[in-house]
Image (spheres, rainbow, N blue to C red):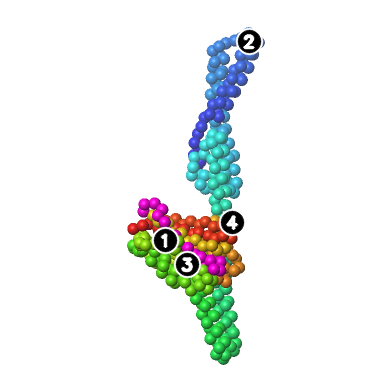
Amino acid sequence: MVKFKKTYKFAGKSSFYITLFTTGLLIVLEFLFDKVSLPVTLIFAISVAVFSFFVIQYRVEHFIYRGVKKIYDDVSILDSASLRSQAITTDMATLTKEVKKFASDKKLEIETLKVREEYRREFMGNVSHELKTPLFTVQGYIDTLIDGAVKNKELRTKYLERAQKGVERLVYIVEDLDMISRLEMGELNLEYKKFDIINLIQNVFDLLEMQADKKNIILMFDRKYRSSICVNADQEKIQQVLTNLIMNSIKYGKENGTTEITIEDLVKDKIIVRVRDNGEGIEKQNISRLFERFYRVDKSGSRDEGGSGLGLSIVKHIIERHNEKIYVESEFGKGSEFSFTLEKC
């Protein structure tokens, strides 16, 4: 049974106008026939007012129940099940407002679901593509070996090495997928410790020096830091953040370019680490999507550089798990700067 949240404004006004008209008409008729009687006129006015009020109120409620409720049930955008549990108002203005709000909420919900569906479809396509490329590479080399190339020692070694690289790429993608899944579900615990961020960055520089040398890119600090800068974070995860950001700066950097690290005090208990390069830069329309899984600015060439396509997404999740912020600024053709905050010791 529908519960009504009653309002008597509409019935009250309507009965007042009816009473006013009918009483006025009665007075006019009484004047015409010279039979003016104040008590009779008063009783008549009260009777009309009471009768019309209750009739109109009943009809309004009846209309709401039979008419508007049917609209609730018939219009697919409205969820009648949720409306049945709520009181239905007889105030048409309030009712209209509620229906519009409900329809607006449902429309927003539908649009959100469409965006999620599109994102899911794109994500599945990206996963399929990222896994398919190394899988087909490995399969191709193994099939060639089975078809007879295995007898050629030089060719066999060459193809096995290439197949091994394909398997390593697959392992890399699967490990990154596992990490980002655990990060999103909150299953990856952080191990906080105090460490020197300067030493950590220098270690990452040493690890990536060979990749940088291939493009003659210089990895450097903006100045010589004479004292250590102590931070409180998960050292292994922050090393991964720095590795991913510096690797990207090398990957998209210009030949004979630079990757520069700056560390600044942000507030009393925070520092900000900036990773700046003078590479390709990023077009404005791509910046908002940089941290999406598998999103690549360069849809073709970037895959040739390797990587899982999950690096920046992992970076963002790690920094946010530390309750810190990550920022990006870029000018196409001039370079990019990624920066993130950390808690000082």
**Crowding at mark 3 (Cα within 10 Å: few <14, some 14-19, many 20+):** many
Sequence-first disc among 1 and 4:
1
- Quadrant assignment, res 67: top right
**Which residue in the structure is indicated by mark 4?**
285
Marks 1 and 4 sit apart, C-alpha to C-alpha, by 30 Å
Query: Residue 102, how many percent across, how many down?
Result: 54, 44
- x%, y% of residue 229? 36, 60
Residue type for callout 1: Gly
Q: Residue at x 57, y 11 (%)?
A: 37
Q: Earlier in the sequence, mark 2 or mark 1?
A: 2
Q: Is residue 179 visible?
A: no
Q: CA distance from mark 1 to mark 3?
A: 34 Å
Label 3 sits on a secondary structure element that is strand
From the image, tell me which residue sits under label 3. 219
Viewer-nearest of discs 1 and 3: 3
Q: Quadrant of residue 184?
A: bottom left
Kindly identify the residue that appears in the image at 57 percent across and 15 percent down: 41
Q: Which residue is mark 1?
A: 186
Indicate yes or no whether the magenta region holds residue 159: no
Q: Is residue 261 magenta?
A: yes
Cα–Cα span, label 2 and label 3: 106 Å
Q: Quadrant of the C terminus?
A: bottom left
**Other residues around mark 1 within 10 Å, as few (<14) / some (14–19) / many (≥20):** few
Tell me whether the residue at label 2 lies in contact with that at label 3, contact meaning CB atoms closer than 8 angstroms: no
Mark 2 residue type: Phe
The magenta region covers: 250-269
> Mark 2 or mark 3, which has the lower sequence index?
2
Relative image position of residue 56 (x, y in whole percent): 57, 29
Compared with 142, 117 (above or below) is above
Residue where numbered disc 2 is placed: 31
In front here: 110 or 282?
282
